[in-house]
Image (cartoon, rainbow, N blue to C red):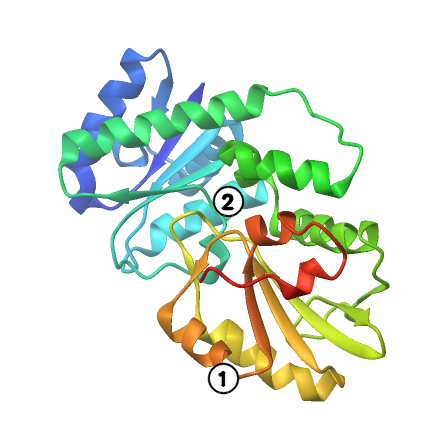
Amino acid sequence: MKVFIAHSSRDTELVNNLGAILREDGHEVFDPATIAIPGNVLSEISARIRSADALVAVVRASNPNVFYELGLAAGASVPILIAAAAGEPLPVDLSSVPYVQLAGDNFRDAQTIARRANDLKKLAQKEPVMFDSAEAALQAAVHDQSRLESLSPFEFERLVMELFKERGYAVTAMEPGRDTGGDFAIKKGNELVVIEVKKLSKQSLVSVETVRRLLSAVPVIGASLGIVIATSGYTAAASGLAAGAPILLRTLEEILAAKSKDDLLELKSGS
């Protein structure tokens, strides 16, 4: 497997350890810091990323080069693994990308990243699996983290919409390009319920801003209730705001645990 490592100069020791481990595992590693050739460096980096089987990015908010390389990888559909320290602010667009939280021990962090990079290889080699229903696909994702990580936010949203259809609800998608808060709406009797779907990495939490936006959208859309369905948990602030509002916070596991159509909306949140 060809692995491109995007990083800043302050992470050189970590990257050197990571490169050594990956090479021992039989992978070809490219570190842009080692470019020592004349000519168009950006062109060389772009070509290396597009030919890579995976990109590992050690993310720090202060390094624009890493984000440039992440953008190239995303545009080329190259699998991405993020490594960042606890508390490092990450752009919203990276919230659904496989993630390793750095502990500060360069050697152990390198070992952890290498293991997760190998998971990307396994994921890329998996044969596509066809499921009989959206519920079966989502159940498989819940029990296989690599399968969940392989779903794009758009595909995850589509599966959740299909799940509600399978449970007997009439589903209406929001107008494309109209960012009102909420991805689709369902009918519960004569009442309208608006639903926001959030596909995040395991370590991420849904923010209070997501809840605030959905709360604002409920009266605008003419709904009586808003529901957030996420692959992760919720921040304390998000849970606090939802507690006193017509907003329900649900995890994917809670939704899939519902035994009937009504249970989809009546489950007690574990947040």
Which label's residue is closer to the chain start, 1 or 2?
2
The x, y position of residue 206, in whole percent, is 46, 64
Name which residue type carries label 2: Leu
Q: Is residue 31 left or right of residue 212?
A: left
Residue at numbered disc 2: 72
- Quarter holding residue 204: bottom left
Q: Which residue: 25% across, 19% down?
A: 21
The x, y position of residue 1, in whole percent, is 45, 18
Question: Which numbered dot is residue 106?
Answer: none
Q: Residues within 10 Å of mark 1 (few under 14, many from 20)?
A: few
- Cα gap from disc 1 to disc 2, whole angstroms: 43 Å
* Figure check: 155 above or below 46: below
SS state under label 2? helix
Q: Which residue: 27% across, 12% down?
A: 24
Q: Nearer the viewer, residue 105 or 142?
A: 142
Q: Which residue: 56% across, 39% down?
A: 142
Residue 77 appears in view = no
| Quarter that holds the C terminus | bottom left
Residue at numbered disc 1: 244
- Quarter holding residue 99: top left
* Figure check: 141 above or below 157: above
**Which is closer to the viewer, label 1 or label 2?**
1
Q: Which residue: 57% across, 53% down?
A: 254
Name which residue type carries label 1: Gly
SS state under label 1? loop
Q: Nearer the viewer, residue 78 or 149?
A: 149
The x, y position of residue 157, in whole percent, is 68, 54
Q: Residues within 10 Å of mark 2 (few under 14, many from 20)?
A: some
Count of residue discs: 2
